[in-house]
Image (cartoon, rainbow, N blue to C red):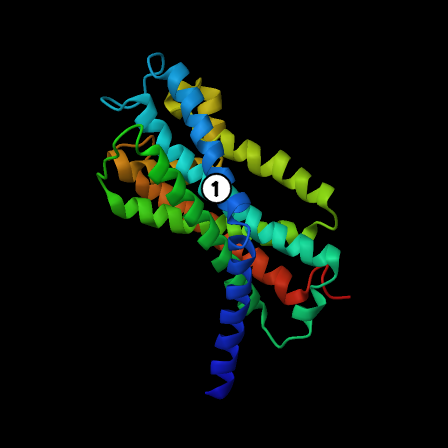
Amino acid sequence: MNAVIDRFAGVRTLLYKEVLRFWKVSFQTVAAPVLTAVLYLLIFGHVLEDHVTVFDQVGYTSFLIPGLVMMSVLQNSFANSSSSLIQSKITGNLVFLLVTPLSHWAWFTAYVGASMARGLTVGLGVFLVTAWFAPPSFAEPWWIVIFAMLGSAMLGSLGLIAGLWAEKFDQMAAFQNFIIMPMTFLSGVFYSVHSLPPFWQAISHLNPFFYMIDGFRRGFFGVSDVSPWMSLAMVGTSFLVVAGLALHLLRIGYKIRH
């Protein structure tokens, strides 16, 4: 019983440390991404509002807001765990965690939990600010919660993998710029995939980020490009694969234990 309590205390302490890490610089980690999303909304919403048709009776600005919210959730969840690990490896303070009796499950829970906290905080901030431009509707709100939680957990897990793999900031930047950014921007944030030619529609359906954003948008409008149950199956399966790989790498101490 005491061992279980000690283990929980360790997870709680590491989780608190990781949350405090991004919250202490919230102007950079929370406010800046919110401003970036608002700028996207102002530019794309102003230019394309009268030129792009999406779902019936859904204006382009209203369509764009959930995509920007989810994009912010995903990018910031990834950034939190990946940047924390790579900074700890490069500065050498990761050794203080390695000498603790924390299990790989404890590491995973704390890092992914903190990533979810940051991603969801930024997403909520983006939603509150952008809702002023187009009053939101909540047709099926349970999908909003489900996909926001799953998406942030998956990208937090993916950030762990990237942080374990990278040995310098250049490698981390390459991972983010050549994998995370393209998959995010080509997932239907700014458009409906039904507007694409058949070939690019098929390519989009191979992107798990598409299902996260499409399922999340379903919660607002009650319509989506694919069934929300298919999106849930795809996102859930992707999360299990990514989380399983992250746990395995933590268990064997990949690139952190020599």
Q: Residue at x 61, y 50 (%)?
A: 82
Residue shown at 34% from the left, 49% from the top: 146
Rendered location of residue 240, percent (x, y): 48, 54
Residue 221: x %, y % from top left: 25, 33
Estimate how packed mark 1 is, as few (under 14), some (14 to 19) or many (20 or more) residues with alpha carbons within 10 Å: some
Which quadrant is home to the N terminus?
Answer: bottom left
**Is 224 located above or below residue 54 in the figure?**
below
Report the residue at 70% width, 49% height from top.
Answer: 166
* Left or right of 223, for residue 119: right
Asked if residue 251 lies left or right of residue 89, the reply is left
Report the residue marked by disc 1: 31
Q: Quarter holding the C terminus?
A: bottom right
Q: Secondary structure beneath disc 1?
A: helix
Residue 64 in picture, x, y percent from top left: 37, 28
x, y (%) of residue 252? 67, 65
Is 57 drawn above or below residue 22 in the view shown?
above
Amino acid at pointer 1: Ala
Residue 229 occupies which quadrant of the picture?
A: top left
Q: Residue furthest right?
A: 258
Q: Is residue 184 visible?
A: yes
In the image, residue 215 sits, relative to residue 23, either above or below, namely: above
Residue 161 seen: no
Where residue 134 sits, quadrant-wise, is: top left
